[in-house]
Every structure is written in C-alpha cells, then in structure tokens.
Amino acid sequence: MSSNNDNMKSAMTIIGVSGSVYIAVKMSWFRKNPFHVFSGKTGAMSKSLVDAGIQSYNAFFEQEDGKGVGTKIVSTPDFVNKFYSLITDFYEYGWGESFHFAAREKGESFEKSIIRQELAIAENIGLKPGMNVLDLGCGVGGPMRNIVQGTGGKVTGITINEYQVGRCETLNKAAKLDHLTEIIQGNFMDLTKVFKDRKFDGAYAIEAACHASNTQALYEQVFAVLKPGASFASYEWLRTDKYDPTNKTHVDIVDGIAEGNALPEVRTIEDCIQAAKGAGFEVTLTFDRATTGGVPWQQAMKSARRAAYLTHLMTGLLEFIGFAPKGTQAVHTMLLKAAVNLEKSGDLGIFSPMYLIVMKKPLSA
C-alpha cells in the first residue's frame, strides 16, 4: 500500500512539475524556445561547471561602497568571459539577439527601437558601403546584422567568448550576411595583437566597453587599429550627474548593477572624455540617449517582469528534477537582481546604459 502511495506521489510530482513548466512557457514573453537554455549546458559551460562558475563569478564581482573590484581589476577579462558563458543563452532567448537597451518612442515596438539604436551609432561613425568597421564586444551579432542590412557596410566583430563566436557565425549564415560580416574571438584589450597591421574605417561598441578593465587602455587599442580620420562611437554604461556617492541607496543600486553585469567599476562621462583625450582622440559628441524617447529605457524590463519570474520558477523546477545543471537558478537569480537594480537606477536617473561618446582619430595621427 505504501509503495502505491509513493508511486502516486511521484506521479503527481511529475505532473505538477510538467504542468508548471507548460504554464510558464505558455504565459511567458520568450522570444525563442527557452528549453535550449536548460538542455545540459549554460552557454559554453558544461553541466558540471555551471554551479562552480556562478559561485566564482559572484565572488569576483562582489562590490561595496562604489569602489569596484579594486586590485582584482586586472583579472576582469577572464570573469567577463565566464559571465557570457553563463548568461548568453538566457539573454538571447529572453531578450533577443541584440544584448542592449534602446531609447523607445511611444507606439514603437521593442524590436524597432533596438534596430534604430544600432543604426544611430552606425550613422555617428559614417558607415556606408565599401567601408569595414569594428564591432567591439559583438556578442552573438544581432547589432552587426541589423547594421549591415541597414547600411550596406561591412562589420568585423570581436568577442572574448568562444560560444558567442559559434552562435554569431551560425546566425550570420542563416541571415545570408556572411559576405558582409566577420567574427573574431579575442580580447578587445589586445586589438593590436589580434589584428596586427590591419586598419579599420571606423569602430563602435554597444554597451560593451563597460567591461574594460581600463577605459583609456581600451581606447588606445581602438585608436591604434583605426585609419586616420576614422571615428569611434560607444554607448557607455555610466553614472549620471544625479548619482550621489554619499547616498547609500544610490551606491547600493549601482554596485548591484556592476555585480550582476560583469562591470569592474561604473564610470562617468568625464572619465570617458579624459580617457578618449588621453588615447589621442578628439571628442566630437557626448549625449545621453537615455534621456530621449517617450518610453523610459527601463520599461522593457518592467514589461517582461512576469516572464522573468516565471522563468525563475522554471529554472528551479528543472534544476530540482535534474534536467537543468545545478547552479542554473543561481545564474538567473543574479540576472533578476541586476534587472531590479537597473530598473531602480533608471527610475532615479542615476545611471545610463547608453551614454553616447563619439571620438575621432586626427588625420595627422
């Protein structure tokens, strides 16, 4: 009799889990099949390494009092690579192929705002047919595909993460854009080693330069691989003038953004301007695109909150029954906390994920 009861309980548990997963998927805001995320790997990490990966990531990026990661900053590239190994599938299957925010107009779809944000940065560097520009931290290539389709120019992307290279190549071929796109695995802090004597007609970074361990060092690398007269534009993650370093709420929110998004520190536009000038660039434009649009940039996350919590439920259920790797829900917990802090920062106006800085390499350089 007890054996029958045990069997009945097991069956009911399986039915309950299956039903919850089905409901979560049906009600969620997933842009693609979410089960890809849980099919034995999280990004580039094997099932056995996910739990250790998220624990070591969290230990490295733990921040306090707005001080960043301190002397550990030189190790940033390794942990940024680990971050994208852990979260690439979550980003792609929950947000889309372009891992960034956008200034959205009222009535404009999320997808259209993303493309408009990408074409705006291409316009700022003057990309047109016959030119070849560099995309720093290109992810799985969503921006490069939209940009080459919109401009006819060629884009060469660089990402530190091997898994993202594979995804980008697959998606570029599927879109039949491999003739206008190129993807290289490498550290954007070492562009002169990766590209040697190769020179580009321009460069851009869409919410990627924030991962640099040293902003000026990164800008110096970009300067070295650009042709004279070429422009470099970057959407930077920065503290705004409204950020108060004596306000604990402000500090905790921005520290939370850094911890959940692999940022060694959170800089200001003044930091970036000085870094650009120190690298030899002429700064031609600075503008916070987060202040534009009829819909706040953080609204996209608020709109997807139900899906995010349902995803969190599903990760826990699938990890419990052994389908998802141990540590999967911890990865999603990190992303949820980051999203909450990003929302708060946008509401307070103390942080921008799209502060545009455009710089030009002098013709005489």
Image: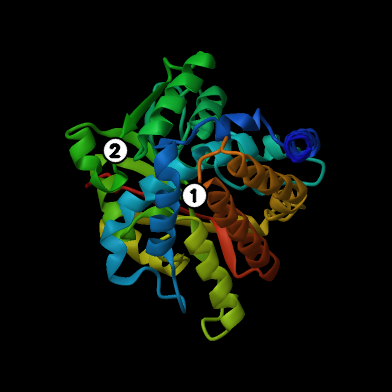
Residue 95 in view, yes or no: no
Residue 353 in view, yes or no: yes
State the residue in front, 33 or 47. Answer: 47
The residue to which callout 1 is attached is 207
Task: From the viewer's perspective, tell me whether residue 98 is left or right of residue 107.
Answer: left
- As measured in the structure, the alpha-carbon distance from the residue carrying label 1 to the one carrying label 2 is 17 Å
On screen, 54 above or below 199?
below
Q: Amino acid at mark 1?
A: Glu
Quarter occupied by the N terminus: top right
Could you tell me residue 343's position as x and y percent? 67, 61
Q: Marks 1 and 2: which is nearer the front?
A: 2
Task: From the viewer's perspective, tell me whether residue 301 is left or right of residue 38.
Answer: right
- Residue drawn 56% across the image and 45% down it: 100
Crowding near the residue tagged with mark 2, few <14, some 14–19, many ≥20 C-alpha atoms within 10 Å: many
- Residue drawn 18% across the image and 39% down it: 193
Residue 107 circle label:
none
Which badge, 1 or 2, is on the more N-terminal residue? Answer: 2
Could you tell me residue 215's position as x and y percent? 34, 59
Could you tell me residue 57's position as x and y percent? 41, 56
**Which residue is at the far bottom?**
246
The residue to which callout 2 is attached is 186
Q: Could you say which quadrant of the image residue 184 lies in? A: top left
Task: From the viewer's perspective, tell me whether residue 342 is left or right of residue 275.
Answer: right
Q: Could you say which quadrant of the image residue 92 lies in? A: top right
Circle 1 SS class? loop
Could you tell me residue 172's position as x and y percent? 48, 20
- Residue drawn 31% across the image and 50% down it: 78
Question: How are the residues colored?
Answer: rainbow
State the residue in front, 283 or 115. Answer: 115
Q: Amino acid at mark 2?
A: Gly
- Residues at marks 1 and 2 touching, judged by CB atoms closer than 8 Å: no
